[in-house]
């Protein structure tokens, strides 16, 4: 059907016409603040563990549990928040996420003992599991033509959150204590609650639910704020394009929005959206994403925690790594700050590649570079070289993490987008849980070679997995149905 001739237009037509303007700028800022908050809470794990261990005389296993419990909470939260936002709306999702994260984060500041701190940090992790909701919400406001670039810009909020947390710990830890770091780190989640009232619902979600009148009101507001106009005609919830559907790959690859049937606009209850991930059209994508996110998270968080272990002066295995760093001075915070800065060139590299060579090859290239940077750490290296190699490895690990986070919600239809991306993210959290218990534990036991070898294996498996994805999403419009 010629929609233009018929006086009709779709949501994608509207987004392309109004373009990326001030309205999307606000959406970017709000969603980005959610990622900024998560990055700060994750980076805390690199700083407070040793301080808490010293204050409460904890074992190394108890120290590792402080990291693992956060990832365990994120594992549960990623599944929960995805289902909630796919069934009841994106806004309800990130309202609840912000309340849980801020409440538990603030209360953990006043923890009287180790057990209370573990429970509250687990609740913080549960809230942080909803990061895919913020990402999917922002994704649904962006025109397809430059979606990759803007999603990379969105990812900079994670990087700046990491850098800010490293700087905050650098300033606060030597002067106050770990409780103040926890308190200050809860502030971004509080800001999300303050600004919640002006955050709009996703018009794509509303169209998927058949509520085109509310979607149209939001589109009109976007056009007004951006000082543009919507296309002439009547908004419809989707379009059918038989030619594209016939020529596209078999697994949910139609580049245009398929028309919505009545059944797909009805609210899904319980875990039905979760089970849709295992339909014949989506199961291959789902399983490949799980492997990719596990390998990506295992290597990314491993590099972060490896930086802490090799730069903090805690290791007695390699005296040369301790020669210029005293655990009582700023060495740990300085090196964490430097390696956090590595994420900026990583984002730049991913921005250059993502809309030029596509999502799949961008990840493959940057994984390969991360492999090259990590390989020399199979054996002991001088302290300065170790920091430089970790800088390069983290740069590329962040790039792959960014592109994977863009790619996963693009692969799923709107009806299961946050569930699919959230579950994939949850599987990644398992990688984050295993990392401090296994890889960093190996470093503590003077098995650096084995730890780095595990990271390299995870990278190789991830590269193979990337090549098995059936198609790339570069330049494709988002799908609303499976």
Image (spheres, rainbow, N blue to C red):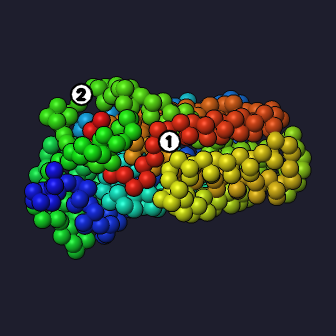
Q: Is residue 245 above or below residue 72?
A: below
Q: Nearer the viewer, mark 2 or mark 1?
A: 2
Q: Is residue 346 left or right of residue 200?
A: right
The residue shown at (62%, 51%) is 365
Of 225 and 60, which appears nearest the observer? 225
Residue 414 appears in the rendering: no
Alpha carbon separation for disc pair 2 and 1? 34 Å
* Near-viewer residue (358 or 142): 358
Marks 2 & 1, CB-CB < 8 Å contact? no
Q: Give the residue drawn at x 21%, y 45%.
A: 240
Residue drawn at point x = 16 percent, y = 55 percent: 2
Please give the residue where the numbered disc 2 appears in the rendered image: 269
Task: Work out whether 285 lies above or below 348.
Answer: above
* Pointer 1 residue: 108
Looking at the image, which is closer to me, 449 or 67?
449
For label 1, the crowd category at 10 Å Cα-Cα, with few meaning under 14, some 14 to 19 and many 20 or more, is: many
Relative to residue 482, is residue 407 drawn left or right?
right
Q: Is residue 61 visible?
A: yes
Helix, strand or loop at disc 2? loop
**x then y, percent, for residue 315:** 82, 42
Q: Quadrant of residue 329?
A: bottom right
Q: x and y percent of residue 279 in the render?
A: 35, 26
Residue depicted at x 18% and y 70%: 229
Query: On the rendered image, what quadrant is the C terminus found in?
Result: top left
């Amino acid at each position: 059907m010629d929609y233009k001739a018929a006086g009709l237009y779709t949501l994608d037509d509207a987004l392309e016409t109004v373009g990326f303007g001030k309205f999307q700028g606000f959406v970017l800022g709000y969603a980005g603040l959610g990622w900024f908050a998560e990055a700060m809470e994750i980076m805390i794990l690199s700083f407070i563990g040793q301080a808490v261990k010293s204050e409460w005389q904890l074992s190394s296993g108890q120290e590792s549990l402080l990291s693992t419990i956060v990832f365990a909470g994120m594992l549960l939260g990623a599944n929960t928040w995805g289902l909630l936002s796919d069934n009841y709306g994106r806004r309800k999702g990130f309202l609840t996420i912000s309340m849980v994260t801020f409440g538990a984060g603030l209360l953990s500041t006043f923890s009287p003992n180790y057990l209370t701190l573990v429970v509250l940090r687990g609740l913080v992790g549960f809230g942080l599991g909803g990061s895919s909701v913020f990402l999917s919400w922002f994704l649904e406001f962006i025109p397809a033509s430059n979606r990759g670039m803007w999603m990379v810009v969105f990812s900079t909020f994670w990087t700046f959150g990491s850098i800010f947390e490293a700087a905050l710990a650098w300033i606060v830890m030597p002067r106050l204590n770990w409780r103040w770091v926890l308190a200050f780190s809860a502030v971004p989640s509080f800001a999300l609650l303050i600004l919640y009232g002006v955050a709009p619902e996703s018009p794509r979600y509303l169209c998927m639910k058949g509520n085109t009148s509310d979607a149209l009101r939001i589109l009109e507001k976007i056009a007004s704020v951006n000082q543009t106009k919507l296309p002439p005609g009547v908004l419809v919830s989707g379009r059918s394009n038989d030619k594209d559907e016939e020529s596209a790959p078999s697994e949910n690859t139609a580049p245009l929005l398929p028309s919505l049937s009545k059944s797909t606009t009805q609210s899904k209850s319980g875990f039905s959206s979760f089970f849709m991930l295992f339909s014949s059209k989506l199961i291959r994508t789902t399983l490949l994403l799980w492997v990719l996110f596990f390998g990506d998270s295992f290597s990314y968080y491993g590099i972060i925690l490896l930086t802490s272990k090799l730069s903090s002066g805690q290791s007695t295995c390699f005296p040369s790594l301790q020669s210029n760093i005293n655990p009582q001075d700023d060495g740990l915070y300085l090196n964490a700050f430097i390696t956090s800065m590595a994420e900026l060139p990583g984002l730049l590299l991913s921005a250059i590649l993502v809309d030029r060579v596509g999502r799949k090859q961008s990840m493959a290239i940057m994984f390969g570079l991360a492999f090259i940077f990590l390989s020399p750490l199979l054996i002991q290296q001088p302290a300065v070289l170790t920091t430089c190699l970790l800088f390069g490895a983290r740069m590329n690990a962040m790039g792959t993490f960014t592109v994977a986070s863009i790619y996963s919600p693009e692969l799923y239809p709107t009806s299961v987008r946050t569930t699919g991306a959230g579950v994939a993210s949850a599987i990644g959290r398992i990688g984050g849980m295993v990392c401090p218990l296994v890889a960093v534990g190996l470093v503590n036991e003077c098995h650096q070679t084995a730890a780095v070898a595990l990271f390299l294996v995870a990278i190789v498996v991830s590269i193979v997995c990337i090549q098995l994805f059936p198609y790339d999403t570069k330049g494709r419009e988002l799908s609303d149905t499976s």
